Amino acid sequence: MMKLMSSAPARIPMYIQLKTYMMSQIQQGIWKPGDKIPSENELAEQFNVSRITVKNAMAAFVNQGLIYRIQGKGSFISDSAALPLTPFEPVESLESCIAFLMPRLDNLYTANLLTGIEQELADHGYHVVFKLTHDRQEVEIKRLKELTQLGMKGIIIYPVEGETFNSEILKLTLGDYPFVIVDRYLRGLDANCVSSDNFTGAYEATKHLTSLGHTTISFLSTAITGTTSIEDRLRGYEQALSDAGLSIEYRLRLILNNHLSIYEQIKQYMLDHPDVTAIVATTSTIGLFAMKSARELNLVVPRDLSIVCFDNQEKSELSEVPLTYIDQNETNMGREAAKRVLSLIQNPIQERSILTLPCQLIVRGSTVSPNLARS
């Protein structure tokens, strides 16, 4: 059962999440010795965090001798920066390594997942190897081949968006190699999966809005088809509308094109649908862009427009109106995925299952009863 909370639970500090990302850039060879790295302002903007958060993360790498600063020029990767598989310990053998294959590492959601995985594996004497697919299935196939051939003890896979499954994942299901799908399940595939309860999360987000009196509620998301987490969120949204006696209208659904400006798409949608009083956004990024679009259109959040999103970003906490959101506790999700793959390493012959983790609705300042006088 989802629990209502007036404030967010304790989470992994943002600077630790950012440190995880920065270390992965070094490990992947993306940041090489001598390279100038993004400025504090650029990293703060990229991750939607405060500059002080970036300063804290950067200071840790300076203290380790991995980064050095030149007055007036910026920060650079030190020549002494090796490419270890974990931030602090050398790896003696790939027999102690478990891979985490992920689409990208440019957001705090993935950083939270990675933090949880690394913590759980480290507690059991394992190291984590990070590999990126850049949300491309052909890269995912290539990386899976490489990792299994290298002799990794197991793999945790965060699939690319819109994917049912690829040939390499299908091959893994036919054997007893330890692997776990995280963030979602793959429909029609017999595999161990760990994800949050996306249906209930979206249901509770929408129910929260209907209970406040909203009747015209839009659903804003990235591509739906093939991504079970988004599909389940749409089902939860529609079920909550139905249970509230509201009709399900296709016009209230905005599927964003990743190749176009999210901000401009949302702003135009709001102009075309002035009767909308509330939004359910499938990511915090979409929620923040919805807030920005509302401001540009002289709409006041939450007086004129209520917003609920999935996941939290530090920037939304620091904004004038903190977003009401669905907390998936990604760090715990990462830990559970790591626990599952460790269990499979000990005993590969187990019944396969989908572990669905509860979400929490965190009510903050972006949702109130609708302004019936809105024109």
Image (spheres, helix red, strand yellow):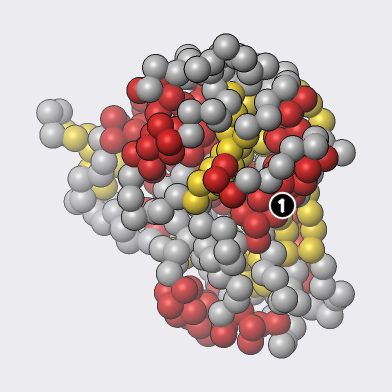
Q: Judge by depth and name the residue closer to the eye, 244 or 309.
A: 244
- Asked which quadrant contains residue 19, the reply is top left
Left or right: residue 186 compared with residue 81: right
Taking 72 as reference, is 176 above or below it?
below
- Asked which quadrant contains residue 4, the reply is top right
Taking 278 as reference, is 25 above or below it?
below
- How far from the left and from the top, in percent, is residue 249? 63, 45
Crowd around label 1: few <14 · some 14–19 · many ≥20 (10 Å): some
Q: Judge by depth and name the residue closer to the eye, 143 or 150.
A: 143
Count the numbered circles shown.
1
Which amino acid type is marked by label 1? Arg
Give the labeled residue for mark 1: 235
- How far from the left and from the top, in percent, is residue 357? 78, 49
Q: Judge by depth and name the residue closer to the eye, 248 or 55.
A: 248
Left or right: residue 223 compared with residue 57: right
- How far from the left and from the top, in percent, is residue 366? 58, 20
The residue positioned farthest toward the left in the image shown: 72
Local SS, label 1: helix
Q: Is residue 240 visible?
A: no
Taking 189 as reference, is 2 above or below it?
above
Left or right: residue 27 compared with residue 173: left
Left or right: residue 285 compared with residue 338: left
Image point (34%, 55%), residue name: 259
Q: Quadrant of the N terminus?
A: top right
Q: Judge by depth and name the residue closer to the eye, 78 or 46.
A: 46
- How far from the left and from the top, in percent, is residue 305? 54, 22
Q: Is residue 326 visible?
A: yes
Image point (82%, 73%), residue name: 352
Image point (79%, 78%), residue name: 348
Image point (75%, 69%), residue name: 192
